[in-house]
Amino acid sequence: MSQIRPIVRAVALLCAGAAPLYAAAESSADTNAGAPPRVEITGSRIKRVDAETASAVQLITAEQIARSGAATVTDVLRDLPSGNAGGYTSEGTPGQAFGSSGISLRGLGAGATLTLINGRRVAPFGFGSASFVDTNAIPVDAIDRIEVLLDGASAIYGADAIGGVINIILRKNYEGLGVTASAGTSAYHDGNTGAIGLTYGKGTLAQDGYNWLLSLSHRDSSPVLVNARPRTRDSDFRRFGLTDRRSSFSSNAYTASGTTGGSFLGIIGDCPPLVDAGSPLNGRCVNDNTTAVTLQSKSQRDNVYSALTYDLGQGWEMFGDAALSRSRQASGMYSYATNSYGAYTNDLVDKFGLYGNAPGTTISYLLLPADHPQNQWGKTVGVRYVFNDIPTTINSESRNMRATLGARGTLGKWDVEGAAMFSRSLTDTSYRGYIQDKVLINDVLDANGLVRNSFLLHQPAKNDAGLMGRLYPQLDNHADTSTSSIDLHGNRELYTLPGGALSIAVGAEYRREKFDATPDPLFTDGSIQLIGMTGSSGSRSVTAAYGELSAPVLKSVELSLAARSDRYSDFGSAFTPKAGIKWRPLPQLALRSTYAEGFRAPSLPELHAGNTNGYSKVLDPKRCPVFSSTNDDCERYVAFTTGANPDIQAEKSKSVTIGFVAEPVPGWSLSVDAYHIKRRDELSTISASYLLDNEAKYADRIVRNPVSGKLDHLSLITANLSSTQTRGVDVDARGSFSVGDWGRFSLSASYNRMNSYLSSGNPGEDPVDYVGYYLQPKNRGRAGVAWDRGPWDASLNWNYVGGYSIKSTPDAVCSFEAATPQYCDVHSWLTASAFVRYKGWRNLELSLSVQNLANKEAPMDASQLAYLQGYGTSYHSQLGRFVQLTASYKFK
């Protein structure tokens, strides 16, 4: 009975806040008194005194996060030099994964980057093309440190970590009550943020036998409209030597003629005409979506997190953690008009060929009959119309929960830890502003394709409310994902080698994954053709076992070997090894190298996604060996289906790193690591051109008319088609020095040089090197200098993103080359941030952080002007200078 009571008391404390709890329990001190602490480093389960292993690991501390002024984990990780294209961002053009963020190490995609919390997996975000962890759901105030493993697949945490591992380790052992409040604004007086947090901790393991921590936080951010920035103050980009993207597709009437309309007649409704003699839009009603599109979404984030560590006696302790988070995000989007609608749906047609077209020709206007109450011209006219009677918006709410309960201690000569974990992610996303096709065709238009007299254009309040609700329905997507696991691992020293103790770690894990993403039925049944979405529903069990050896064969040489075996209930098994060596020829120099193999089984969305139908213009090489404009098989619209493929295989990888760590003088270090990652059998959607060029191989995916032989349907399902090789170098340097009475300075810098990024989209194709091309900068880096003196401390940091071509491949053509060649490149970007803090008052700290000190605009990406952004959201920001004041008070 005496053994049960401490456990009962510990569980009671864990639940005491009537709120979820969170804990970080990655490191622990050796229980032998006087021994140096042994810690567990990301990438290894063997505790060690020497923090440098054969693997390259970058560390981001809570202090560095505080000095950066970052509001979210995403803000912290986006500046990683090792990060690259393939992630998800909260900003930019909203998509199916709206409201989430995911990190892509080495540019291999968010699905190839394993993101952990306290060394354990969590439930993935419910939408998007890859299975990834939403970093927006992790409370930045609760972080103790972030460890980034950069040497590819990890045989310890999971062989699917092809790009690397991000291990987010949360706080523990807090005492007292602390309150933090902050407020910030941009140089344009928008994007305002306000945040408040409370942290309470009680007890110490040494004196009280437990520590309990509870943290609450709330943050609000106001939206920023696109037209609030100079570059996109409106969509007339002639001031940059580019085109005027304001549109005549608003509510302008033209003679019904041809496919786009003939002579301009006038404006429908009370829209003020444009006064611009130099513009072909002069006198017309113009649509400028910069007044509706958001540059930064409105967001609200709430987090509750708590952690408990409880001393059970006899060298054992119990730990528990749990958390709840809620993230809300809302954004305005551009509305589409009859030109895009007609082109992509073929639903607007000159049915009888009355307006100079062949019967059934697609047109890009609404036909307003002569007797319509808004028609003042006495004849049928064509109205270039924008479907914004209901503004196009997207709103997302994600709720995440996580709980872990476990114990660690010594069992004989073994250090043992085991835990059970459950996490769940719920996402609801609603869209408004997309029109339902059948309602437009059947209820707004009559049998002849003309606007009914009962429907008024751009006067939604005067139309039937029920009709408007059906025409612009609210579309609701819902996702429910979960990951539950049980793990047990232990490590011990076996015997003594010439260089030290031979150590072993073994572990086993069982986890259950469930994924259920359900788009609105109107998205999946073809009712809204302009945007198609697919759902996914499935579950599986995964069992894994792994082992690791650390062998200091000489005082200067340490060998490491690890291996992992995974078995998927729905897929199969895999064995993945990893090996490393560290050689210290001098006390101040260590050489290191690793080799690892990776295995990424298809995710549940990739295995169980539904199908999406559409149309694509293709050239049929069998019936059009030589292009001719008179041969309709040279440009033929063909129906296609995309979706999951039950026959797909796993992606596999091999990675090698080699480098060194030097400590020329105490307190100063330099590490340089070269890497080479090769991934094959990558999952991608097969292209129509590749399918048709290899018709003999893929005959079962091509349907031809049995009489004419013309193409009728293509199956463009997911397949193992692509391969990628990437090579580069990581550099990390840091050190500090004293200047006597003037305090102490610390310097730090990290840099990534991507030397090559070779990729081939289909088997047998020659790989293309994408380094330096679109979204693949060769160089990324950051550097900082920090100063501490008495109650004052300050820092200055720089972040650098190298430039890259706007062309997607070396053979691509830059559409700006002839008239504005300066826009064929996205230029490099260097920004600075500053931080200053004063701790001279009792229990009170005041700090000021300024991001983007010089208020520099993001480099121009002219290809994004079509989306009214004008910059790439993967690396850059148009928020501008952002100033934040923070006050922290700790009650004692």
Image (spheres, grey):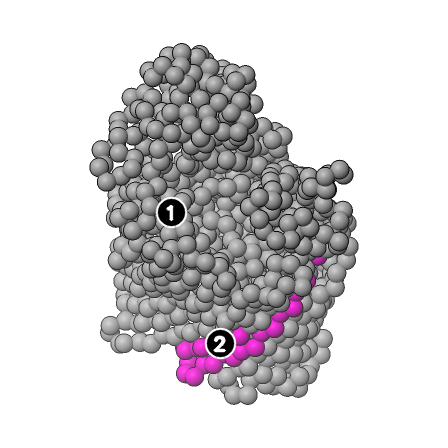
Q: Is 741 one of the magenta-colored residues?
A: no
Residue that extends furthest to the bottom in the rendered view of this protein = 585
Residue bounds of the magenta highlight: 650-674
Dominant secondary structure, magenta: strand
Q: Position of residue 536 (x, y in %)?
A: 65, 40
Residue 540 shown left or right of residue 587 in the figure: right
Front position in the image: 673 or 468: 468
Q: Relative to 883, is 726 above or below?
A: below
Q: Amino acid at mark 2?
A: Val
Q: Relative to 411, is 881 above or below?
A: above
Q: Relative to 839, is 38 above or below?
A: below
Residue ID for mark 1: 865
Q: Amino acid at mark 1?
A: Leu
Task: Compare marks 2 and 1 and give the one earlier in the sequence.
Answer: 2
Residue 851 shown left or right of residue 316 in the figure: left
Q: Position of residue 326 (x, y in %)?
A: 49, 39
Give the residue drawn at x 51%, y 20%: 449
Front position in the image: 96 or 422: 96
Q: Position of residue 66 (x, y in %)?
A: 38, 56
